[in-house]
């Protein structure tokens, strides 16, 4: 029998994408917690994998799960846990910060406390965010503790990281933290930048550009993202933090122009500017030399190739979409 892996947050874009990767490349026995079985990511992306029926799905609402997540993990007794589950709508985190701290932080407290009771566990991999550092024009190394979160969402993720540090250093829990720059690709929710723009272009809608589009981001395609997590499973060192970046930082405007060029649209016919989001960081720069050295990982898919594959996916998806699945505000 292959290794058992528990995916916390399998119905998230990242969780579903990594599960798809595991199904195609390993014989792992996969268990996954989800909150919404009708999630469009599962319905239209993950279920297209012929091996999806082998995944063991477990309903879980992290808002009220102090003990349930622990019970689930003890029953499965996995070799690996990869934790994707969080809510990450920055605007919403200002409106309901308590919800964000309950789901992103408090739901993990009792769980992490019980990690050492999982006898087969080799690694618990927590997927975090560079937003814990706030805006920075300098490259931030993996072990930097210069934290400056600028939103309740980022603060909730940092709180979990600090908790994990406590248990990693003092209780010898088998914890690894991974921080990725902007991850995009096939199956990303339609409210995100790239799929949202493609959806607007395919349905003759104006795309709302928040602010001036000058913020710079680094974009990692799904294959590179998934390969990075798998490298952690194979080679990651307990207690380590790893950064994943393509080291190619582009303004939001540049990414939009690339998509418009591929789709054959003009800026003035599509883009409308709206007020920028509160607490939006202008820059994220991650140093990933340690990751490249220890894990033998690097980003291989260029933004141009990644965007073409993503556009093709959403062009085909647009023909199948039930418009009732569209639940985001333009």
Image (tube, rainbow, N blue to C red):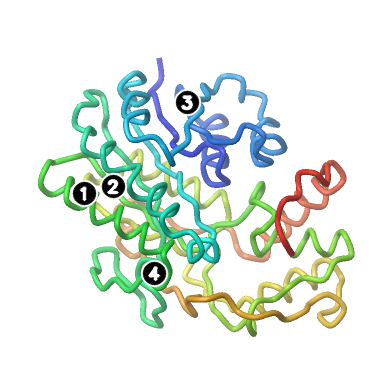
Find the distance from the CA under tag 3 to the CA under tag 4: 31 Å
Q: Residues within 10 Å of mark 1 (few under 14, many from 20)?
A: some
Residue contact between numbered discs 1 and 2, judged by CB atoms under 8 Å: yes
Residue contact between numbered discs 2 and 4, judged by CB atoms under 8 Å: no
Q: Mark 4 points at which residue?
A: 286
Q: Which mark is residue 239?
A: 1
Q: Based on the displayed image, in which of its 4 quarters is residue 320 positioned?
A: top right
How many numbered discs, if any?
A: 4
Find the distance from the CA under tag 2 to the CA under tag 3: 19 Å
Q: Which tag, 2 or 4, sits closer to the chain's start?
A: 2
Q: Residue at x 42, y 41 (%)?
A: 230
Residue 220 appears left or right of 166? right
Tell me residue 51's x, y (percent): 62, 23
Q: Quadrant of the C terminus?
A: bottom right
Q: Along the line of sight, which residue is nearer the eye, 121 or 288?
A: 121
Q: Along the line of sight, which residue is nearer the eye, 243 or 81?
A: 81
Q: Which mark is residue 30?
A: 3
Q: Mark 2 points at which residue?
A: 176
């Amino acid at each position: 029998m292959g290794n058992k892996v528990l995916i916390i947050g399998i119905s998230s874009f990242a969780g579903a994408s990594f599960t798809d990767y595991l199904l195609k490349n390993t014989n792992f026995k996969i268990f996954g917690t989800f909150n919404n079985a009708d999630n469009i990511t599962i319905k239209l992306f993950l279920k297209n994998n012929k091996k999806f029926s082998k995944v063991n799905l477990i309903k879980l609402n992290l808002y009220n799960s102090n003990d349930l997540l622990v019970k689930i993990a003890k029953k499965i007794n996995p070799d690996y846990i990869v934790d994707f589950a969080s809510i990450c709508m920055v605007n919403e985190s200002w409106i309901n910060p308590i919800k964000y701290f309950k789901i992103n932080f408090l739901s993990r407290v009792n769980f992490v406390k019980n990690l050492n009771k999982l006898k087969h566990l080799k690694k618990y991999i927590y997927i975090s965010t560079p937003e814990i550092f706030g805006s920075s024009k300098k490259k931030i190394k993996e072990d930097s503790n210069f934290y400056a979160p600028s939103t309740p969402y980022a603060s909730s993720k940092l709180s979990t990281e600090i908790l994990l540090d406590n248990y990693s250093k003092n209780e010898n829990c088998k914890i690894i933290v991974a921080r990725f720059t902007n991850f995009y690709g096939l199956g990303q929710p339609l409210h995100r930048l790239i799929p949202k723009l493609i959806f607007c272009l395919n349905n003759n809608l104006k795309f709302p550009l928040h602010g001036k589009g000058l913020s710079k981001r680094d974009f990692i395609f799904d294959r590179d993202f998934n390969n990075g997590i798998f490298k952690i499973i194979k080679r990651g060192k307990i207690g380590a933090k790893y950064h994943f970046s393509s080291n190619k930082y582009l303004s939001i405007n540049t990414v939009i122009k690339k998509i418009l060029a591929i789709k054959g649209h003009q800026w003035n016919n599509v883009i409308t500017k709206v007020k920028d989001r509160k607490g939006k960081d202008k820059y994220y720069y991650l140093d990933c030399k340690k990751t490249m050295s220890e894990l033998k990982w690097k980003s291989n898919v260029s933004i141009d190739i990644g965007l073409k594959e993503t556009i093709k996916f959403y062009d085909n998806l647009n023909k199948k979409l039930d418009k009732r699945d569209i639940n985001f505000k333009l």
